[in-house]
Image (spheres, rainbow, N blue to C red):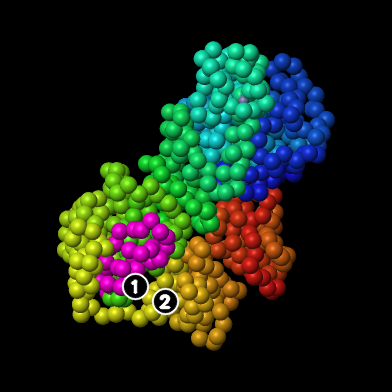
Amino acid sequence: MTDYFEVHARDGAARIGELRLSDSVTTPALVDDVLEDAGSLWAAEREMPEGSDDVLTVLPHRSLPAGSADEVRESFAVDYPAVDFPSVATVTADTAADYGSDAYILSDAQGFVGHARAFRDEIIEAKENLPADAALMLSGVATPRNVSLLVYAGVDLFDEKRARARGLEGFYLTNDDEYFLEDLDELPCACAACQKPASEFTRADAADHNANALRAELARVRRRIRDGRLRDYIEGQARHDQWLTAAFRRFDQQYSYMEERIPVIRNTELTAASEESIDRVEIQRFADRVTARYTNRFDNPLVLLPCSAKKPYSESQSHRQYQDAVQYRAHMVSMTSPIGVVPQELELTYPAQHYDSVVTGDWSEDEKSFVAEVLRRYLSRNEYSRIIAHVPPGAYTEIVERVESDLGLDVEYTVSEHPTTTESIGNLMRTLDGEPKYTREEREHNVVKAIADYQLGPGAGDALFEDVELEMTSRYPKLQVWNDEGVQLATMVPQYGVISFTLAGAKVWRDSDAPTKTVEIDGFVPHGSVLAPGVVDADAEIRPGDEVIVDGPRAFAIGRAEMSGTEMVDSTRGVAVEIRHVEET
Ligand SMILES: [Zn+2]
């Protein structure tokens, strides 16, 4: 239970929070000015401090060095009383528990920051043991270079201690490096402390500069979290230190920790610019869902196509040429790095139209293996009468050939030199001679069903939308789904390529065999949003951004999850669900 910390926005494990002191502090942030330490119990018996709304009071504690034996930790564990002022309890990952504090300091941080695996393990263990809505603090470890990764991992509060200490030791820190003061002919910064010639710059100035640089970096990180683009930044920034690169790879290996926290949709671009982009949750999740949830419903041959830089693909010049050649006689699936494969029905679905990758035409072996693996899984699950590969020579063709031989398929190739040459387009057109056309109606039904499968789970499309009418309301398919009695059930939202339900649609969903995501609430009628304390229970499968049914003794509603299901149940503050439609029951 926390009264003095509230999470307002999330980007994976990173969060924008608010320390609700008399002057509120937006986190992640440095808290030197608002932290009051009631002292160590090693030195003396301590009176319980009086506390104040102006500061975060660190309750009397006994810190143990990193690596202390479990028996030692247990016998010296402090029992934290409940207090009614903003408080911080000092714990380690394995003594972490809900003591009712607003924030928790991991006392052995200096032992694991700098070691990728230990850092990941300690942070994940601590986060699992602590309440979801409490702030996590690391003291004496933050530098301008490492703080973005610390935030990415889920840490909220820091202090200037290490940055200042390094300055006094003669080190000048930037967000990408650290220098001996003596080696600087010129100060690579324009902060207030750096407004003097390098020759007059003292260690005390370096301490001030280091703290300024840390503060500036935290401001940048907060901006990135608000934009939902911290990961894009980390992939580049972490390059500047080996352990940071190793650490975020370690977090990628811990897929479930990040997956639970990464939203299913975003309205911002995803930059896939490094070899680690393939391991991002958004990319892996798309590949998983396309190969485990999606089912092809077309009876036509498959045409494999290269992706286009312009998204959605169908609006690119090259894909218009392919469409003109195909003329509704084939199911078009695009191959792309790093997303894998994108069936035409899912070209709007996040992140298929939101990613931007560096197009050099050269794919690394990792990229080729990834796309080949996704294609292999896709073709093992979906059968076609014919498979036509309209892809350029090089990586694309190599991947198709690899999968063709692995699965014992027979693929027809239609490209000579380049997919958009007159000859290649002519080949594609002729090879489909005699194949039946599908109708626009069939295509649109397949779009809403494919999105339902992708979003809700295998079979959802058929369970929900077997007998529906569709209406297209704008040029790019903003499809509305109606039942045969003229009641609207859902809309396909083109910005994210997801289904959003009406109340009537939510009831069809609730009563169907499709997997549902439900938030149970107390006896009230929510207007606008459901706050976490009103949540009685929530499916653990709920991710931020998910469409959710909200059900309670007095209300039935449909809305969008603002946090994961686990966090809704765990939290005492914050918006759990934004409500779209509600009715009293
Ligand atoms: Zn400076």
- Of the pair 56 and 193, the residue shown nearer to us: 193
Q: Residue at x 29, y 66 (%)?
A: 382
Q: Amino acid at mark 1?
A: Arg
* Left or right: where 119 falls relative to 316: right
Q: Residue at x 59, y 58 (%)?
A: 561
Which residue corresponds to mark 1? 297
Quadrant (top left, top right, bottom left, bottom right) of the N terminus: top right
Asked whether residue 269 is in view, the answer is yes
The location of residue 384, given as percent across then percent down, is 25, 69
* 101 to 422, vertically: above or below: above
Give residue 445's mark: 2
Q: Amino acid at mark 2?
A: His
- Confirm whether the magenta stretch covers residue 93: no
The location of residue 161, given as percent across then percent down, is 64, 22
Q: Residue at x 49, y 80 (%)?
A: 471
Q: Earlier in the sequence, mark 2 or mark 1?
A: 1
Asked whether residue 91 is in view, the answer is no
Measure the alpha-carbon separation of dots 2 and 1.
Answer: 10 Å
Q: Residue at x 73, y 25 (%)?
A: 37
Query: Do residues under tags 2 and 1 come within 8 Å of each other at their CB atoms?
Result: yes
Q: Which residues are magenta?
A: 299-325
